[in-house]
Every structure is written in structure tokens, then in C-alpha cells.
Amino acid sequence: MYSMEDYLDVAKRIFEGTKYKASDEDIRRLADNMILLSRRGLDRLNKRLTDSKGNGVWPTIAEHNLAAMLASKLPSEISIRYEPDEVQPPPDFKIEVGGIVYWIQMKDLSKLARENIQRKTMDRVQKEAMQIKIGRFFSCRLSDDFREDSVAELIKFMSDKATSAAEQKTLLYTGKRGEQAEVEFWSPKKLILSELTLGSAGDLEVLDLTALARDQIKGSLRKAVRAFNWDSGQRNMNLIVMEADGKEDIDICDAVFGTEYEILGGGRHSWSRNSDGLFDDPAFLSKVAGVIAVKRKIEWVEEIALLSAEEVVGRLSPKEREMTKGMNSEDIKKALEWKDPGPVAEYSQILYVNERFEYPLQNIEMLFDFDRIVHYNMRPDAGNGDFE
């Protein structure tokens, strides 16, 4: 029987095999989850995690987080089985509740923030580049040490180069601290742009970023559905759970329900969807009762929230002072009141319903605590692509 110290050592070694710099809290959380899963008979998943190497750790941690979430919600008498032997190749999880067998396939769509381009910084680059009234596309890759306070200088560099830069020639920006960005510009072949627009290019063809995100999601879900060699029904439900950090709800809706389009005419403004969603695909709709998107929940830091703005600023390290240069004390406090939870985290959960099936939603809700249940005729807020 392992002790808590044993599990802490195992969790530490798992993180040491990656590039991620785990905190003591990360290690403790992973150890706690490993103990929970061991008690629920899921040592096979614990072993899968300890055997994983490098970037292969992260998809398994996604499965581990999901299993911990299910184990915390479901009573101990309900069996949660990982990769059950009676099906080959097996879906990730099998759970039987109230005479219904739930088969769950987990799909990791995201790259964690520690390995991603700094998304917040990139969002600002995209937003500020739109103020440059030059009708071209651009792509931008930031070095790991690129910080948000370097964006203004990068935007000036882009403004100076955008008009004259050769098609898709890589230009290197180097900041005062040695941080770098690679920027490319190209002109649209069919579209007319009024400002510098973030895009992606391949073989000099323009690719729409929203379509890229939607198609990536569809491709991942098509791979996941291969785990089910049987149709979904009222007593045998197939569910796909996808870790969707960094994915917008509008792209998930487009992928599963069909691409949105606007309808203008007769003084009315409405919308509908094309028949290009996965729930329109016969090979998918008969097999999947629902798609569940999960995202790590950001966490409130109570000890920061209870301090005054001046007290928060007074506690900043020299590195933090440099990173928050130019921000007022109130904004610094607001930024620090919330934190990224790290790889081992609780999930927010959204169910996208396949309405071709007639089944009571409360059956699926026995397994999950959904923040929202989304149907075909629902759409996210147009401003940010996410449900509010």
C-alpha cells in the first residue's frame, strides 16, 4: 500500500519527465487524484500516467482529470472502468448507472498554456494589428520569453514592414530584452481586407482561422468516434469528452451542429446553420449521443482578493514588477486575483446535444455537472465566440 509520500514522489517524477515546471501544489493535486483513482479501482490509469513520457503525459493527465471528476461525483458502489477488456480496441471509460451503459472516449484538443504561444499576448497583437489599415494577412510566432509589454514595439515593427514586405517572407523582430517574433505578410487572393488581419497560410492559399479551428475539432472528433463500433441508444450511450482549453464555443458549435450563416432580407435579420456539422454526418450522428467540452477552471486567489491594491503591489517580486510595468495598482490586483490552475484542475463542462436521439438528458446529467447544455438552435455571443 502506497503512502502519501510515495504518491508525491511518483507525481514529482511524472512532471520531471516533462518541460513543465510543476509547483508543490501541482504535485500534491496529482498525488491526491492518484490516491482517489486507486481507491476506485483505476490503478490501470495511474500506471498509464506513470508510463507516459514527455508530451504524452498531457493527454493522459486529461483522462486522469476526467476520471477524478467522475470518481468524485459518482457513489463508490458505481464502477468506473478504464479501457475495459471486453471491447477491443476499448473506449477510454465504461460506466453503468441505472441500467444504462455509458461509453466515454476522451479527446485532448488543447496544448496547455505552458507550451502554447502566449495566448493573451497574441490576442493583443491581433487586436492592435487591426488598427493598421493595410489590407494584408499576417502570421506571427512569439518566443517563449515574449511579454505583453513588448507588443507596442512589435506593432510598430509590423506597421513599418507590412506594405513593403515580400509575400510570406519571414521577418525577425528582436526586442530590447532579446525576445523575438517571426512575422510574415501576404496579400489575399479573393478577399478585400481593410486592415492587417491575422490569418494562416499554406502554399500561398488563404485559410480562414475559424475554419481551421472548426476543422481541427471535427477531425479530432472523427478520430474519437472510431472507438465506438456500435450505435448509441437509450440503454447504451456513447459520449465524447474533449478537453477544449483555448477553443471557442462558436467553433465547437460550428463543428458539431453546422456552420452559422446570417439571413438578411425583408427588414429582418436572422440566422441558421449549414448542414455540414458532425451531427449531420450519418457515420457520426448514429454513434454519439453528445459531445462534452471541458475546460480548466481559472481559480480565485482569496489571499490576494483580501488585500488592498497597494498591499498587492508592495508584495510583488522584481520579476513581477517588470512584468506589470505600466499597469496601475487596481489592474495589477485584478490580474492576480485569478490564476491558471495548472494541468491538474477541475473542469467546466458544456454538453452539445445530438438531438437525433430521444433520451432524457437527466440520464447523462447523472454523470456530469454541466455548466450549460447547448442545442442546435443556440449560438454563442458574437463578441467573443463563447457562451456567457
Image: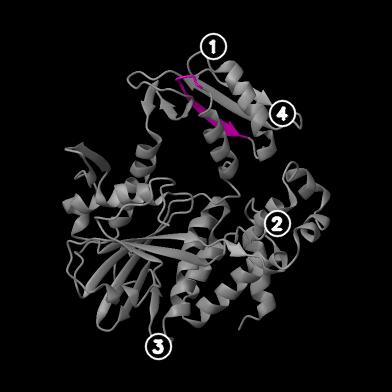
Q: What residue type is labelled 1?
A: Ser
Between 204 and 362, the one lying in front of the other is 362
User: In the rendered structure, which amino acid carries the disc numbered 2?
Assistant: Lys
Spatial separation of the CA atoms under disc 3 and disc 1: 68 Å
Image disc number at residue 77 = 3
Q: Name the residue under label 4.
A: 175
Sooner in the amino-acid sequence: mark 3 or mark 1 = 3
Closer to viewer: mark 3 or mark 4 = 4
Instruction: Give the Cα distance between marks 2 and 4.
Output: 27 Å
Write down the quadrant of residue 284 in the picture: bottom left
What are the residue bounds of the magenta stretch? Answer: 133-142
Badge 2 is on which residue?
Answer: 333
Q: How crowded is mark 4: few (under 14 residues within 10 Å), some or many (20 or more)?
A: some
Magenta segment main secondary structure: strand
Task: Specify the quadrant that holds the N terminus.
Answer: bottom right
Quadrant location of residue 243? Answer: bottom left
Foreground mark, 3 or 1, reads: 1
Relative to residue 48, is residue 253 depicted above or below?
A: above
Q: Name the residue that disc number 1 marks.
A: 164
Q: Please state which of the two labelled residues, at mark 1 or mark 2, is closer to the viewer.
A: 2
Q: Nearer the viewer, residue 186 or 311?
A: 311
- Cα separation, mark 1 vs mark 2, equals 42 Å
Q: Distance from label 1 to label 4 (Cα)? A: 21 Å
Taking 216 as reference, is 114 left or right?
right
The spot of residue 220 in percent (x, y) is 35, 49
Front-most of 51 and 349? 349
In the image, farthest residue toward the bottom: 77
Contact? badges 3 and 2 (CB < 8 Å): no
Of residue 94 and residue 136, the one placed in the foreground of this image is 136
Q: Residue at x 53, y 27 (%)?
A: 131
How far across and down, in percent of the image, does residue 132 sit? 53, 23
